[in-house]
Image: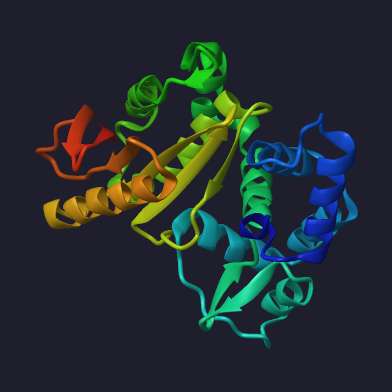
Amino acid sequence: MYDYTSGYPFLVSRLCKITDEILPKPSWTKNGLIEAVKYLLLESNTLFDDIVKKIYDFPDLKDILYAILFHGEKIPFNSYHPAINIGYMFGFIKNDNSSISISNRIFETFLYNLFMSDEVLNSRIYKAAMINKNNFIRNKELDMEYILNKFAETFHDIYGDAKDSFIEENGRRFFLLFLKPIINGVGNYYIEARTRNMRRTDVIIDYLGKQYIIEMKIWHGNEYHKRGELQLIDYLDYYHLDIGYMVSFNFNKNKKTGINKIILKDKTIIEAVL
C-alpha cells in the first residue's frame, strides 16, 4: 500500500475502507489492493476535488505538473513560488532532492487521467483505439504485441508527417491516450517516477491480475538504446516477468519501422519502432 500512497493519510484510510467494506471477499490481497486503487481513482472525493480546484485556480501549477508528467522535465523546487507553494502545502507535490515531484503514485495516476480527459473527445488516436478496443483482448489478457502494432500503424497514419520536435514532445502522451480506452474500467496503469525523464518513461499496467511493462523512449543512438534494453531486462527481473515491451520514437532517417523481437538474457522484448 505504501508504494501507492507514500503514507498519505487520507489515501491509506480510504484504501483500507474500500478494501474492507466495498470489495468482495477475500480482498486483503495484492489483487485486492489493485482493485481498491482502481476504485479510488474512479470515485469522487473531497481530496481529489481540492486538487482539481487548486490546479485550475493556479495555471502555473498546472503547467508545471504537465511538464513533469508528460515531458519528464526536472523543475527546481522553490517554496516561494506561489503555485509550487500551494501544491506543496496541500501535499500533492514534494521536494525531491531540490526538484519537484508528485507525492505518490495515486496522485500521479489521477493527474495523468485528469489531463488526458481534457483531450479524449478530440483525440483521433484515442478514438482509433476505442473503435478497436475489443480486438486487443485475448482470453482476458492484453495482446500487447497487437496493441503496439496497431499503435505504430495508427500513429504513422495520423502523425507520420509531423515534425520531429512535435513527436518528441507528444509521442509518449499519444501512447497513453491510445492505451486508455483499452484498459479503461478493467485495468489500471502507473508511471514509474524513478525512471521518468525527458528521454524515457516506463509504464506498468495491471490488468486482471497480470502486469505488463512498457518502456517509452526517444531514440538517442544505439548505445543509449542498448542501455535501455538492459534497464528493461532488470525491470522484468524485479517484477518476475519474461516479456517486456518498448515503444521507440526514432528520428533517424534510415530507421526501420515496425515490430521487432529481441531475445536478451532469457527475456523477450517486443519493440515498436516509430
Closest to the observer: 235 or 94?
A: 235
Q: Can the viewer see residue 92?
A: yes
**Can you give x and y, in whole percent of width and height, for residue 6 in the image?**
67, 65
Q: Count how many numbered circles sit on residues in the image.
A: 0
**Can you give x and y, in whole percent of width and height, for residue 205 in the image?**
52, 38
Position of the C terminus, as image quadrant, is: top left
Q: Toward which corner of the image does residue 216 lie, by quadrant?
A: top left
Closest to the observer: 22 or 182?
A: 22
Q: Toward which corner of the image does residue 86 lie, by quadrant?
A: bottom right
57 vs 92, left or right, is right
**Can you give x and y, in whole percent of width and height, for residue 63 in the image?**
60, 62
Image point (28%, 42%), residue name = 248
Q: Toward which corner of the image does residue 224 lie, by quadrant?
A: bottom left
Closest to the observer: 3 or 184?
A: 3
48 vs 206, left or right, is right
112 vs 205, left or right, is right
**Can you give x and y, in whole percent of width and height, for residue 44 in the image?**
86, 44
Q: Can the viewer see residue 118?
A: no
Q: In this view, does 243 lie above or below 79?
A: above
Image point (77%, 33%), residue name = 26
Position of the N terminus, as image quadrant, is: bottom right
Image point (82%, 29%), residue name = 24
Closest to the observer: 228 or 230?
A: 230
